[in-house]
Image (cartoon, helix red, strand yellow):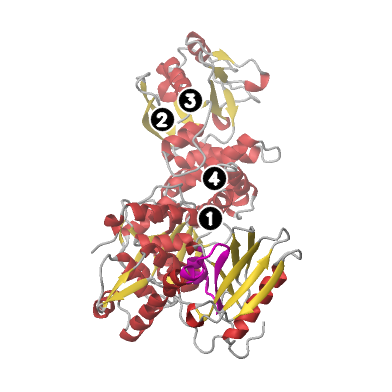
Amino acid sequence: MTDELTMARAGLLDAMEALESHLDALVIIGAQAVYLHTGATDIALAEFTTDGDVAVDPDLLSSDPLVEEAMSNAGFTPDPRPSAIGSWISPRGVPVDLMVPDAVAGAGRRGVRVPPHDSKSMRRARGIEAALIDNTKMPITALDRAADDREFEVSVAGPAALLVAKLHKIHDRIDNPSRSDNKDAHDIYRLLRAIETDLFLEPLSRLLDEDISAAVTGEALAHLRELFARGASARGSVMAGAAEELVGDPATVSESVALLAQDLLDAHGA
Amino acid sequence: MATGEVLSAADVQKRVVSLLRERLPETWNLTEAVASGQGSLGPDLSIQLAAPDGQVTRLLVEAKQLVERRDVATLAHQVRLRAADVGEVPVVAARYLSPSVRQALTEEGLSYADATGNLRVLVDSPVLFIADRGEDRDPWRKGRPRGTLKGEPAARVARALVDYARDWSVRELIAVSGASTGATYRVLEYLEREDLVTKKEKRYRVTDWERLLRAWSADASFQTTTRVMAFIEPRGVDAFLTKVAKQSAFPTAVTGSIAAKEWATYAPAKAAYVYVSSIQEASEQWGLRPNAAAPNVILLEPKTVGDVPFQNASKAEGGYPIAAPAQVAADLLNGPGREPVEGEFLIEWMKANEERWRSD
């Protein structure tokens, strides 16, 4: 377990604490949510993340306290970069992103329209809609419980919702990928490998039935086919393998993620 | 090399002289003297070598048609007695010396030469070292090869002899190994010639299980004794082993690094090597997909070794069956990449913990 991972979890807990009265409106997404589902496995690439990602459901968000005030009072500062709307830096330096799914974020381009909260307190993001539908409550604790005994019961996005969100993220950046995008592709492998194929099917059907998530889920399945299921040399499969360069077995990862993606699409189509 | 008539002892001697002549530095002088007149007590040939500085040594050549592994110790004693004087160096010569005989001679510190060009001559003063490689099989041998440890009977007998620490009557060995009577005698004959078993009052005993294990491994690699097919389990090796642990419908035995880690911990394995009675049945049962690009499961279906790989299998901590340590070590020695090193590591463990795997 890395110090970064422990720090990232602590940052997430700081945000939970700050937004405790809004806890029901929050859903943990991103790498930390992925690891909560996949657990420790015999995967060569260690779990690694330095931040926390949180989806916010505006329908469940009350008007008091204001998100920006709650965060500031807990010692968070907004990331000053204009591109980082909704990104808050914890007192210990961990970035925590508060994001509202595009489908429910009201009008606007990057900020959100969730009055009375400040439009720049949270960021609009497309692809995370599924997290509002497919999630389960889990107890979230520190990774080093001896030093930090906080615990919050919070919703965590389900594997299907995380798959949809990761696929959108990879697809959005496919023309300009960086090394960190390889890790996102590797998270797809991690999810598909740890979760039995059948367990994705019911949540996927539900996501395709719900108005707010149907479109992004349909697109995500198309991305899964294009970027992974087409084979080990498809771009997403290659990126997932590249994430294990020097530490694991890139070829096996690329082959495996392609097969698992095919399995899922076959089972879903059947 | 011509492989017509079998060479005479004189032919062997001539050949040894010319081999040496061709390989000596030009500044050295070679003179030969055949038949020293001491009859069977003397060497067959005496070769005098003179270095440029005038120092002289005499090679006393003992020329044989054939030398068996089991003859080496006696032969070494004889030739050493003969080369008692300062400046005299014994040399064992034959029309052909097999790899195991050459190795035994080297371990004895003896010089040797054969007519196919295998050569190792070591002189302390004047300092001289000549070595060369000839054939690894006897080109003059007619008919059936004198035997190897290839094939099912040899596998049965070798594994029984290695797996159990005991003296054997032929009848007992037949019963335990499952080899036929005729085949068991043939294998034992070969093992005796190779000095891998000794016979005393109708009972056979292994001289050195490690050497037997290595000899068998060298002759019968899993690549030649089994049908090998590569697969991928996209959920990884651990998920695959969990499936293996759950089934018992057909004979299965995990070998290679994964089996070895039960006894001698090493690095994590990228691929699982698994003996199965039928590749088709197993791959269907376990949902494996054929994959040559990046396999993580290799299935081995015995082709010429019967059910030997499954003999004395046990259960790993993870619940899946693993082959016996001797089988695993033999497979690792023939494996790719760092596996031979892991094989050596396992053999070290087997030497240090014989009572834990070698039953009475």
Q: Earlier in the sequence, mark 2 or mark 3?
A: 3
Is B102 a magenta residue? Answer: yes
Residue at 33% across, 69% down: B206
Look at the picture and state if A82 lies above or below B62: above
Mark 3 packing: few (<14 Cα in 10 Å), some, or many (20+)? few
Element carrying mark 3? helix
**Chain containing mark 1:** A
Q: Are marks 1 and 4 on the same chain?
A: yes
Are the residues at dot 3 and dot 1 in contact (C-beta closer than 8 Å)?
Answer: no
Quadrant of the drawing holding the C terminus of chain B: bottom left
Task: Point out which mark residue A248 bears.
Answer: 4
Percent x, y of residue B36: 57, 79
Residue behind mark 1 = A259
Q: Nearer the viewer, residue A169 or B118?
A: B118
Percent x, y of residue A174: 67, 41
Percent x, y of residue A126: 59, 33
